Image (cartoon, rainbow, N blue to C red):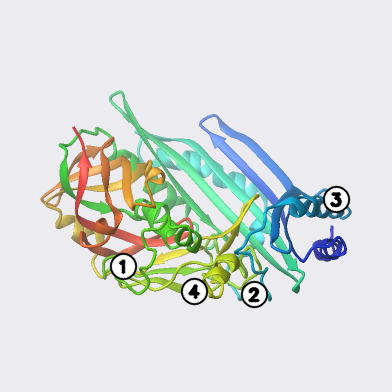
């Protein structure tokens, strides 16, 4: 199927049927996934799909429809259905228009030929190495599962204000689940790599880090309820930022009065130790692209500058409401378009993780949590259960901990209680973050 031709055909159809404006966004994905378990190679799946998303306006009546595209002529019926829905939709008094122009930002390292045209034998060998490698490090551990996924995307978007534009991208992910067992006790930890290319993929490091943390999690003991110093490792820190800070800087949440950062532009909201950037054009990061899900060119922008809030994230709709320009942060689901973060980058500090660990008098280093996604971004209240962690006293690791709950107001935790962030940082999905050292946080233990 010629995606450009389908977009143009759909736009003409929408205008012919009385649409004031129309936008058609088509994504074609070719994917491969390979799964291995203790039994060996379990499954290989390959597939192809093409989806189309149509946003259409008749005056101030709007709709967004998503469908699997089965052929070029199918676009006619999808547009016809969207027109019928738009005609009876309630008016949206805040609707202004679709983007008036589209654009692209040059982005490097988002297409890898090894992913676009995969050599299955090479990737099967990676699964086998992931299954066998952990046992070679320590006899107390084994890999319960190794899985990789390969995807090649082609995206085409156009609207009645602007001609269609196209982008291409690949995505590679590798996940390994490690189990550690000793004296009848078992614990686990999963580690992963995800990026558009394999350029920075080091399987040995992915496995070694998972083994190290799984072993460190053995023989966990409870600790007393109280206030503790806490070292949030990059994986945990990134999850907390995703759950609490990112929603608060989304313009739609601000407009709906669901953000504690409403009316806080150019105010100090976090510690001066924190500078947070959103960069939709960063090389070899999962959320990088030449344009967002509305066709607006991506860019790098500072959200929080040394603790001061300097920008919200906008798509076209929210930007029109606030009289601003889109920041190139539109994200599309099957039913809506809204502003969201792309790649979040936290600038590192000056101290090493080892030196900070030596400074811990009574605290915990947290490697893994669950439940932080249930924290409340409207109030800023953090609540997370530690699955992998270590209790530290006077700079020495004493024993593993799990099941404790850390909680508190995130703007205090990452405000006056934040001591520093480390000079070491990690890529964790669509985030590049250091570890964070918090002087005091509430811990619910025994």
Q: Foreground: 446 or 389?
A: 446
Residue 125 in the image: above or below residue 57 = above
Quote the CA–CA distance across marks 4 and 2.
Answer: 13 Å
What is the x, y in percent for residue 216?
28, 41
Q: What element carries label 1?
A: loop
Please rate how many residues cluster around mark 3, counting C-alpha atoms within 10 Å: few if below 14, some from 14 to 19, many from 20: few
Quote the CA–CA distance across marks 2 and 1.
Answer: 30 Å
Residue 82 in the image: above or below residue 274 = above
What is the x, y in percent for residue 234?
35, 56
Please rate how many residues cluster around mark 2, counting C-alpha atoms within 10 Å: few if below 14, some from 14 to 19, many from 20: some
Please rate how many residues cluster around mark 1, counting C-alpha atoms within 10 Å: few if below 14, some from 14 to 19, many from 20: many
Classify the position of the N terminus by image quarter: bottom right
Q: Is residue 78 left or right of residue 376?
A: right
Label disc, if present, on residue 303 of the rendered structure = none
Q: In this view, does 7 lie to the left or right of 407?
A: right
Q: Is residue 23 left or right of residue 114?
A: right
What is the x, y in percent for residue 248?
41, 59
Ranked by sequence position, the earlier of labels 2 and 1 is 2
| Residue at screen point 28% across, 64% down | 422
Label disc, if present, on residue 77 of the rendered structure = 3
Quote the CA–CA distance across marks 3 and 4.
Answer: 39 Å
Q: Mark 1 points at which residue?
A: 274
| Residue at screen point 29% across, 58% down | 411
Asked if disc 2 and disc 1 are in contact, CB closer than 8 Å, the reply is no
Q: Name the residue under label 4.
A: 300
Asked if disc 4 and disc 2 are in contact, CB closer than 8 Å, the reply is no
Ranked by sequence position, the earlier of labels 3 and 1 is 3
Q: Name the residue under label 2.
A: 104
Residue 289 in the image: above or below residue 220 = below
């Amino acid at each position: 199927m010629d995606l450009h031709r389908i977009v143009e055909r759909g736009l003409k159809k929408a205008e012919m049927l009385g649409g004031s404006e129309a936008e058609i966004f088509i994504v074609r994905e070719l994917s491969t996934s390979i799964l291995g378990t203790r039994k060996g190679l379990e499954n290989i799946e390959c597939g192809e799909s093409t989806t189309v998303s149509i946003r259409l306006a008749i005056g101030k009546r709007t709709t967004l429809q998503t469908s699997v595209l089965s052929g070029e002529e199918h676009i006619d019926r999808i547009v016809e259905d969207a027109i019928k829905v738009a005609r009876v939709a309630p008016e949206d008094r805040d609707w202004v228009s679709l983007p008036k122009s589209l654009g692209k930002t040059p982005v490097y390292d988002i297409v890898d030929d090894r992913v676009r045209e995969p050599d299955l034998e090479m990737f099967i060998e990676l699964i086998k190495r992931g299954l066998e490698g952990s046992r070679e490090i320590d006899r107390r551990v084994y890999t319960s599962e190794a899985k990789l996924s390969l995807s090649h995307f082609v995206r085409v978007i156009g609207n009645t204000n602007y001609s269609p534009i196209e982008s291409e991208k690949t995505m590679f992910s590798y996940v390994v689940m490690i189990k550690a067992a000793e004296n009848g006790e078992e614990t686990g930890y999963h580690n992963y790599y995800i990026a558009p290319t394999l350029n920075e993929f080091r399987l040995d490091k992915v496995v070694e880090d998972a083994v190290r943390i799984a072993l460190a999690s053995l023989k966990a003991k409870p600790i007393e309820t109280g206030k503790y110093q806490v070292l949030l490792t990059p994986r945990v820190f990134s999850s907390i930022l995703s759950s609490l800070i990112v929603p608060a800087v989304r313009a739609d949440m601000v407009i709906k009065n669901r953000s504690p950062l409403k009316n806080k532009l150019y105010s100090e909201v976090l510690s001066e130790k924190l500078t947070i950037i959103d960069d939709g054009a960063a090389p070899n990061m999962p959320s990088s692209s030449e344009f967002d899900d509305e066709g607006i060119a991506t860019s790098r922008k500072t959200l929080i500058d040394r603790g001061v809030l300097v920008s919200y994230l906008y798509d076209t709709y929210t930007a029109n409401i606030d009289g601003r320009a889109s920041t190139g942060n539109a994200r599309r689901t099957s039913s809506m378009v809204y502003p969201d973060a792309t790649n979040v980058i936290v600038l590192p500090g000056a101290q090493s993780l080892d030196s900070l660990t030596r400074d811990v008098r009574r605290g915990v280093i947290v490697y893994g949590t669950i439940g932080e996604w249930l924290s409340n971004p409207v109030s800023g209240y953090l609540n997370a259960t530690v699955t992998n962690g270590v209790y530290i006293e006077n700079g020495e690791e004493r024993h593993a901990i799990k099941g404790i709950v850390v909680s508190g107001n995130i703007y205090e935790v990452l405000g006056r209680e934040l001591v520093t962030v480390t000079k070491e940082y990690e890529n964790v999905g669509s985030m590049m973050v250091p570890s964070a050292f918090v002087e005091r946080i509430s811990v619910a233990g025994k």
